[in-house]
Amino acid sequence: MSSLSDVDPEIAELIRAEERRQADTVKLIASENYVSRAVLEATGSVLTNKYSEGYAGKRYYEGQQVIDQVETLAVDRAKSLFGVNHANVQPYSGSPANLAIYMAFLNPGDTVMGMGLPFGGHLTHGWSVSATGKWFNPVRYGVRKDTGRIDMDEVRSIALEHRPKLIFCGGTAIPRTIDFPAFAEVAREVGAILAADIAHIAGLVAGGAHPSPVGHADVISTTTHKTLRGPRGAMLMATSEEHAKALNKAVFPGLQGGPHNHTTAAIAVALREAATDDFKAYARQVVANAKALADELSSRGFDLVSGGTDNHLILIDLTSKGAAGKPAAQALDRAGLETNYNTVPFDPRKPFDPSGLRIGTPSVTSRGMGEAEMRQIGAWMDEVVTAIAKGDADEVIARVHGEVSELTGKFPAPGLS
Ligand code: DSN
């Protein structure tokens, strides 16, 4: 058998380069993480060779003796970890999973209500450039300008005015706890399906560090690769059999063909890992780290949307620092601090050159870093952002990069060799 470096040395070297980059960087992208060696092994397995359209026990190809067991394990582990009656582990990623919710419960043109993208919602919650905003009738809620938080009275009044058939809660840049019971009350009042998109916080929910949507949302969608620390994939969960049947039909044959069995196996591994006490401690530490980092940044004059965080994520409006998001993210990346630029609520700037930065603590927590390291990271961010605001950052970036390398050397990332 030839190894990758024999068959394709270019790709082999690029993978090694990316591995080195990931090892040497303080990864602060809120939606990323480091998976375990076990998850990587399952992802790179021979299960990629098999077609399995259908579900366990009812497939359209023979030879499912092993795959049925793999998928059943993944489904059972999802049900037990999240306390749900039904789980589908086949969606290819978060966007297809959310699209399956539309396919299951809506017809084209029906009204969907979600959080607007600039306020922290996801593209697939009915944003205009997404198929979900073009093929359905979207209405949106945001956050209050004075608090940076969702106003449930506003959510209720928009829902009563537009009577959506589907309401999404959750998103991609929400630093505060999502009030699932309050959303459920609104959804019941207008007869809508409530979908909780917990992609960002699934690991926190599983680890007991964020309230669960189970018992409140009709359907739950999540990716598996963010705080949950699994492979790139997604899951849909439901309590009622009627909802579960509709979701299953929407995923296959509605939207997808054969599931990615290697991903299913890796999801099963990640779910097993997420059921451990170690994972609960990680989930608690993710939040403790985010709070420490938020405190440090606030004390240094950074303007945090909503004033802080309850979860893994911090959204920073850099206007008060005299910088914009994109140049700040680029300078921080050169210093070994990886972030993404992001719009902030009521952003006067364009999405490709916005006012904000989004950061998060899942990856640094997976490396074993704690509150002391978060304070150091906050100090480095301040130095770099202050330097670029002054227009002369090269020296600071070079020095901070050296200090970042010392830190990353002390905290090896899981899964990397
Ligand atoms: N791209 C994901 C994120 O970074 O939050 C959402 O799809």
Image (cartoon, helix red, strand yellow):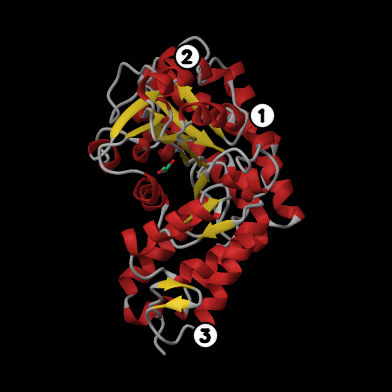
Q: Residue at x 70, y 52 (%)?
A: 279
Q: CA distance from mark 2 to mark 3?
A: 53 Å
Which mark lies nearer to you, 1 or 3?
3
Is label 1 in a helix, a strand or a loop?
A: helix
Tag 3 secondary structure: helix
**Sequence-wise first label, 2 or 1:** 2
Of circles 2 and 3, which is in front? 3
Q: Is residue 107 left or right of residue 46?
A: left
Res 50 label = none
Quarter containing the N terminus: bottom left
Q: Amino acid at mark 3?
A: Gln
**Does residue 275 appear in this view?**
yes
- Determine if residue 343 is in view: no
Is residue 261 or residue 294 the one in the foreground?
Answer: 261
What percent of the width, then of the height, locates residue 286?
65, 40
- Mark drawn on residue 292: 1
- Looking at the picture, tell me which residue is in the foreground, 395 or 384: 384
Circle 2: residue type: Arg
The residue under label 3 is 65
Q: Is residue 118 above or below residue 172?
A: above
Name the front one of labels 2 and 1. 2
Q: What residue is disc 2 on?
A: 144
Q: What is the C-alpha distance between the residues marked 2 and 1?
A: 25 Å
Residue at 58% from the left image edge and 26% from the top image edge: 182
Residue type at mark 1 is Ala
